[in-house]
Image: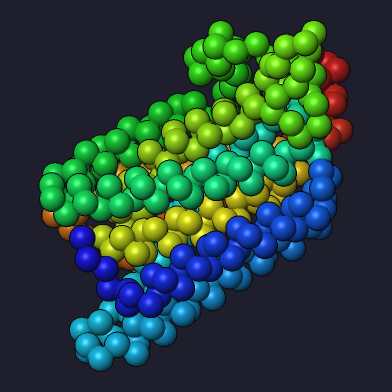
Amino acid sequence: MSSIAPVWLWGFFVLSVLAALFIDFVVLKKQGAHEVSVKEAVRWSLLWVALSLAFNALFWWALTQSPDPAVVAQADTRAMEFLTGYLIEKSLAVDNIFIFLMIFTYFAVPPAYQKRVLMLGIVGAIVLRTVMILVGSWLIAQFHWVLYVFGAFLLLTGIKMWWAAGKEQSLDDNPALKLMRRMMPVSKNFDGEKFFTVENGKRIATPLLMVVALVGITDVIFAVDSIPAIFAITDDPFIVLTSNIFAILGLRAMFFLLAAVAAKFHLLSYGLAVILVFIGTKMLLIDVYKIPVLVSLGVVVGVLAITMVWSVRTAPRVGEAGRSDASA
């Protein structure tokens, strides 16, 4: 499957991602293990969003400079596809973050150690999603009917997400966690940011290794949902890949930001379910009626805005939550 993006922009994207990861890891190493404050999370979140929008502007400019009039004519539409795909991936990452939060809470991971786990998870997600996007692009180019499979999968996933929204989840019966515990002995205590420690003369895993493994498994599961979703917006592999990766790069900062206000967005899973159902339907109708990109962008933004506002309006206040707990 060919891309409308010039070759030099592919190179610039790769270098940008490598530079961003290098800077992030250098900053992480200099800061050491520490708890990320809300202010720090806000600054980093705004920075990643700004960089993503700047890249989209560069993408649009590169298309307008093409000697091919057909490419120039598509500049606005393609830039809109990037923005829509970015928002979809960013919104689906919110549900991913809630699962991360559950994993950290279950293992009682100290806040100072969470940052390293998320960075390793982001690197793993970038590699994994790059491979999956390239394979998905090839499959769609070779077998058009794969789009219908993706559409049906997203539709069913959205329905399942709606059904599971609001229900308490637990890792006690997680098959991956049970398997890992059977395969290796695990210490009950953390040993700093180490993945292995020594107890009674034996080298065993720390709970932090279990956390990293579960975060990686979660990345795989959510990639299966999110990657087909963006193929409903565009068939250009460059847009699919770049919008996906830029959404992931800001995942660490967004985690610490949402972790502080997670309780206020208790209805967000319902909104994400609606978005998945819409995207799945859009993909199933692709040969009957192609929903305009602007309409898709409006639906995504509108559903997220309504869900978040309604969540804040209906979120129980601390005093009310305390009274209801006491009365129970």
Q: Residue at x 76, y 44 (%)?
A: 260
The quarter of the picture where the C terminus appears is top right
Q: Residue at x 80, y 8 (%)?
A: 200
Residue furthest out toward the front: 201
Residue 219 is situated, as x and y percent measured from the top left of the image, at 50, 38
Task: Please give the count of numbered marks on the rendered protein.
Answer: 0
Task: Give whichever of 80, 58 is nearer the camera.
Answer: 58
Q: Is residue 199 left or right of residue 226?
A: right
Looking at the picture, does residue 66 appear above or below residue 160?
below
Task: Give whichever of 146, 180 is nearer the camera.
Answer: 180
Residue 55 is situated, as x and y percent measured from the top left of the image, at 50, 73
Residue 57 is situated, as x and y percent measured from the top left of the image, at 48, 79
Looking at the picture, does residue 46 appear above or below residue 100?
below
Q: Is residue 265 among the parts visible in the rendering?
A: no
Q: Is residue 199 left or right of residue 129?
A: right
Q: Residue at x 61, y 18 (%)?
A: 170
Task: Give whichever of 304, 93 is nearer the camera.
Answer: 93
Task: Give whichever of 45, 168 is nearer the camera.
Answer: 45
User: What's the coloring here?
Assistant: rainbow
Q: Is residue 117 among the parts visible in the rendering?
A: yes
Looking at the picture, does residue 59 appear above or below residue 46?
below
Q: Is residue 145 left or right of residue 183?
A: left
Q: Residue at x 60, y 13 (%)?
A: 184
Residue 314 is situated, as x and y percent measured from the top left of the image, at 67, 40
The quarter of the picture where the N terminus appears is bottom left
